[in-house]
Amino acid sequence: MRVARLLAFAALLAALLSTGASPAAAHNVSAGADLRLAQTIAGTELTVVVKGTTRVPGPLRIGIIAYQPVTGLPVALEVRSAEDGRTVTGEAVAAADPRYAELRVERTGPHVLTLGAGGESAVVPFRVLVERGSGAELLIYGGFFVAGVLLVGGLLTGALARPGPAMAVAAGAAAGVTVAAMAIVFEPMVPPGPPDGAAPPVTALAGGGRPYVQERVATEPARPVAGEEFTLRVDLVDGSTGRPVDDLTAHHEALAHLVVTSEDGSYFRHVHPLRTGPGRLEVRLRADRPGRYLAHAELEREDSGGQLLAASFDVHRSGTQSAADDGTGSDANAGKSDSTGSDVGSDAGDSTGSDVSGGAGTGGAVPVVTPAVPVAGRPATIEVDATGPVRPWLGMSGHLIVRDRDGAFLGHVHEMGSPGSRRLRFTFSFPAEGSYLAWVQYALADRIVTVPFTVEVSAQENAR
């Protein structure tokens, strides 16, 4: 009788625990999550999406999201394991709503994705990660399994009228259930282990982060000509070792955000250069007039903070250009905006992800700044009505980029509203008095819209 009661209690406890609580899964923000990286390639702005995978060997799905009009743009894909060199290839077609190509990977760990489109290529390192089952799960399921086996054995032993062995079997079953129950209770308190394929843990870095990045900016050709395509190259160098910096982490869905503006602000590009080699980023551009151009790069190293790099380069006058252009990049309309909020002198709709042509990119939208004359050091609100439903781009509904007149300052903040809203709202504190150039950017179903405008900021002591 005592044996039967013990067995019944163990069975009831096992049933309650199995139905009333489920084992917690190990949590890791990277394993199972999608990798999204913006790329300015083949004359358009794309985002590469590598879907999180749940098993290896298994399928790896890759899609190419287009943010500007494209017609069946094929993107060649190659995924290579950095550990054994095994390579698989495929092709994806860029589209606003893409179909994902499926490639098979055989192992977790470091891989290299090579993209090819329009005569350009990018080489993107990434890791295939798969969640690893926790030790607690083994105890939970193992404990219940052992308890179940022993319960069956105890019932058979009791039926044969052998009280001693039946008691021992019942005690073993109760112990198995107890182990499983304890594992369920304490599993949330145990830190999850790293997923399969994760990088080795990084030891504490002196000073709380990696050294700052130094940049070397060059163009190919060395003397780019107005109206002709050229390549802007940024080489990243570790400020301590002098070696190429090849540990950039995805920051707002890009390895680097590059903002290129003419000195007078009439030219604006927000692009996402291709990683073409260790520590090297490249993007193709075309400038509409000669003069000095400013390049600001936002990036972030692994296990470190964000950084803003600044450099400049010159675009030269072509032999057929009018003598009215003296090579300074300025003209009568430079830096002015018309009533639609579009810049008069902008180079419209090129391959860099901006549409600022003659009002086509703004639809007559004019940003509203509150207060109308912001005060230095105090928050101001900038609102703009989108010309259609907004979809997320770079993980956000909208972007506000602000530059002072001489290019010494660049700020970048985001709109944090709900996707699909047509009213974009930004909060920004201008650091000092003066005149600022600003651009609001957002994505519609078929294009990226850029709204340029200027803001005059008053000194704090002059504010009422």
Image (cartoon, rainbow, N blue to C red):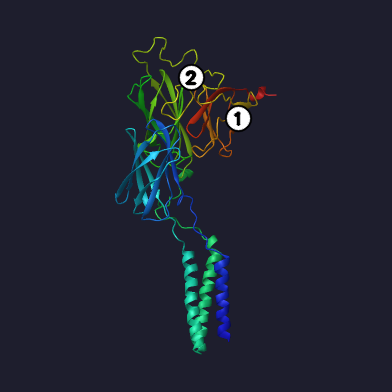
Find the residue positioned furthest to the bottom.
161
Judge whether residue 76 can be spotted in this image.
yes
Q: Are marks 2 and 1 in contact (CB under 8 Å)?
A: no
Residue 264 tag number: 2
* Spot occupied by residue 190 in the image (x, y as percentages of width and height): 52, 61
Tell me the residue at 37%/54% (across/down). Answer: 58
Which element carries disc 2, helix, strand or loop? loop
Q: Is residue 108 above or below residue 342?
A: below
The amino acid on which the numbered mark 2 sits, given as a three-letter code, is Asp
Q: Position of residue 26 (x, y in %)?
A: 49, 58
Circle 2: is it few (<14), some (14-19), or many (20+) Cα within 10 Å?
A: many
Front-lying residue, 230 or 57 = 57
Dividing the picture into quadrants, the one containing residue 324 is top left
| Real-space Cα separation, disc 2 to disc 1, in angstroms | 24 Å
| Nearer to me, 58 or 452 | 58
Q: Position of residue 63 (x, y in %)?
A: 41, 43
Q: Earlier in the sequence, mark 2 or mark 1?
A: 2
Q: Residue furthest top?
A: 323
Residue 262: x and y, percent?
45, 22
Which residue in the structure is indicated by mark 1? 383
Q: Is residue 111 above or below residue 330?
A: below
Q: Is residue 437 visible?
A: no
Q: Which residue corresponds to the image point at 48% horizontal and 64% vertical from the top-left?
A: 137
| Residue 440 position by quadrant | top right
Seen as rendered, the residue at the extreme right is 464
Q: Amino acid at mark 1?
A: Glu
**Discs 2/1, front:** 1
Numbered marks: total: 2
Q: Nearer the viewer, residue 251 or 310?
A: 251
| Quarter that holds the C terminus | top right
Q: Residues within 10 Å of mark 1 (few under 14, many from 20)?
A: some
